[in-house]
Image (cartoon, rainbow, N blue to C red):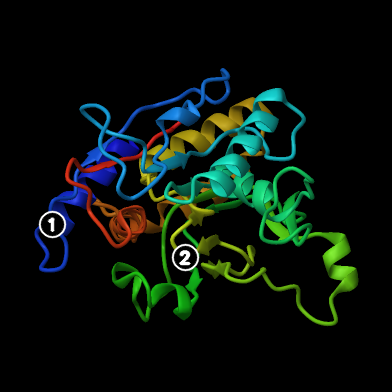
Amino acid sequence: MFRTLLQNAANRLNKSETQSNISVHVTAFDAVGGSLPPLSTLRQSTSEPHAGPLGPIDAILISGSSFSAYEDHPWIHNLQSFVKTVYTTYPEVKIFGSCFGHQIIAQALLQHADAEVQVDEVSTHHVEHSPAGFEMGIHPITLNPEFTARFPPLARAAPFRIQLIHADGVVPTPAALEAAAGPVVLPTPWLNVGSSAQCAIQGLYNPGRVLTYQGHFEFDTFVNSELMQEFARRANWPAEDVASYLEQINRSAVVGGEDDDDAKAAAEAVLLFMVGDRVVSNGLMTPPLG
């Protein structure tokens, strides 16, 4: 899914006047099953020669999950530790996360104090279940102008629209709320990508290092509706809730055409983030997807 979307985004960007020679090579890893990229495969410097047909890993991508980032599972702890290690030890490797990926990255880099792994700040934000329940389907997201100024595909006057399906969110920790004289802000240089009526942090951006979306640019109306209905079946949701969620998901549906959303622009922004200031000679590699 990500492979196709990012390659299509590369094809569009390669036709522009400002970008060329972007290609996407994806290797999938099963984080739930305990498979993560060996650290020896990560890019260590911009001048590092390509060691094989694909070269070192330039970026990692952490997808969504039916699990919560705060659940006590060994694979979640291992993934969180991996994110910390990549961030602190491999600054040339970009980190992107979608939904669960967004949340596990926030939890790894903005919550925990760790004597061995220093992150930008400690205990400013963490992941909680939302008291409002699910944010489902298409809801207008107001993007942060400081963020969109760095990503032309996302510059727009209208609200940002991609599919959402989540009941957890990144929020300030109780300790941060208690210590703050006013609103809790993200530590410098982190930026909040944007906000919706229900979710104040719709993504995170750390220039040149981290980008996350709470939403799913990889989901269209069909995929999100099928996933929602599977959740409903497993949890025995009331029929009226399912009908309401379907209406919210179908807000972007176009009969006989592509969804009316911003998934393509979101994918282009992810790719531009991963490329950064350079396009490597053998293209861009973006694992893991698991």
The residue carrying mark 2 is: 207
What is the number of the mark on residue 20?
1
In the rendered image, the vertical position of residue 253 relative to residue 236, given as above or below = below
Q: Is residue 166 visible?
A: no
Give the alpha-carbon distance from disc 1 to disc 2, as whole Å: 22 Å
Q: Nearer the viewer, residue 14 or 56?
A: 56
Residue 264: name its quadrant: bottom left
The answer to whether 186 appears left or right of 184 in the picture is: left
Q: Which residue is found at the position 47% from the left and 79% from the top?
A: 146
Q: Nearer the viewer, residue 200 or 284?
A: 284
Residue 269 placement, left or right of 176: left
Residue 280 showing in the rendered view: yes
Q: Badge 1, how many Cα within 10 Å: few under 14, some, many 20+?
A: some
Q: Please state the horizontal and vertical placement of residue 244, each as a whole percent of the image.
A: 56, 51
Image spot of residue 168 (x, y percent): 68, 49
What's the residue type where badge 2 is placed? Answer: Pro
Q: Is residue 86 above or below residue 251?
A: above
Of all residues, the one furthest to the top in this rendering is 33
Image quadrant occupied by the N terminus:
top left
Q: Nearer the N terminus, badge 1 or badge 2?
A: 1
Q: Is residue 177 left or right of residue 259?
A: right
Q: At which x and y percent is residue 74? A: 71, 24
Which corner quadrant of the image does residue 70 belong to? top right
Q: Helix, strand, or loop for circle 2?
A: loop
Disc 1 on helix, strand or loop?
loop
Nearer the observer, 131 or 84:
84
Q: Tell whether 186 sits left or right of 230.
A: right
